[in-house]
Amino acid sequence: MKFEHFAINVAQPRAMSDWYEKHIGLKVVMKKDQSPYMTFLADDSGTIMIEIYSNPNAPILDFENQHPLVLHLALVSEDPAKDRDRLIKAGAELISDDILGDGSHLVMLKDPWGLALQLCKRAKPMLASKTGV
């Protein structure tokens, strides 16, 4: 098995999915204009998606008051400092910015809805590149 998508039930799915399209660069695979406003967004590999929706049959998680280590969405970043600054200008909040002992650069932010985002530039990448190397 492999990952297809990770789903989150949020209060403002249309605004949130628009922000992820515009500022994270995720691409719409499917978007519904009616409640629960399901939107599937894929990364540039086209192999994994996040689903953002608002379904009243389940609770909305309180991301704002969750510690980032409880739940975060980690993204590969070629330039975490540049992406950090760009995302802060777009409404994200900086939580931490760390260079690990091995040289990896990890930046933790919260998006405008409180969901934690981690920007990762690993000294030794943990996933294969799009070319399979």
Image (spheres, helix red, strand yellow):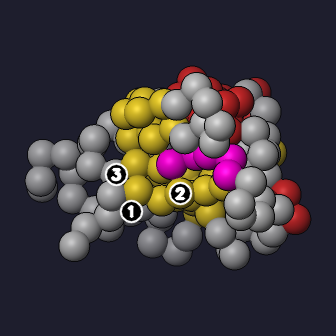
Q: How many marks?
A: 3
Is any part of residue 48 visible from this angle?
A: yes
- Read off the residue under disc 1: 123
Is any part of residue 81 visible from this angle?
A: no
Circle 3: residue type = Ile
Residue found at x 61% / y 56%: 8
**Which element carries disc 3, helix, strand or loop?**
loop
Q: Is 15 positioned to the left or the right of 128 in the image? A: right
The first of marks 3 and 1 along the sequence is 3
Q: Quadrant where the N terminus lies?
A: bottom left
Circle 2: residue type = Ala
Q: Is residue 53 magenta?
A: yes
The magenta span reads 51-55
Q: In the rendering, at what x and y percent does residue 62 appear?
A: 82, 62
- Read off the residue under disc 2: 7
Q: Is residue 67 magenta?
A: no
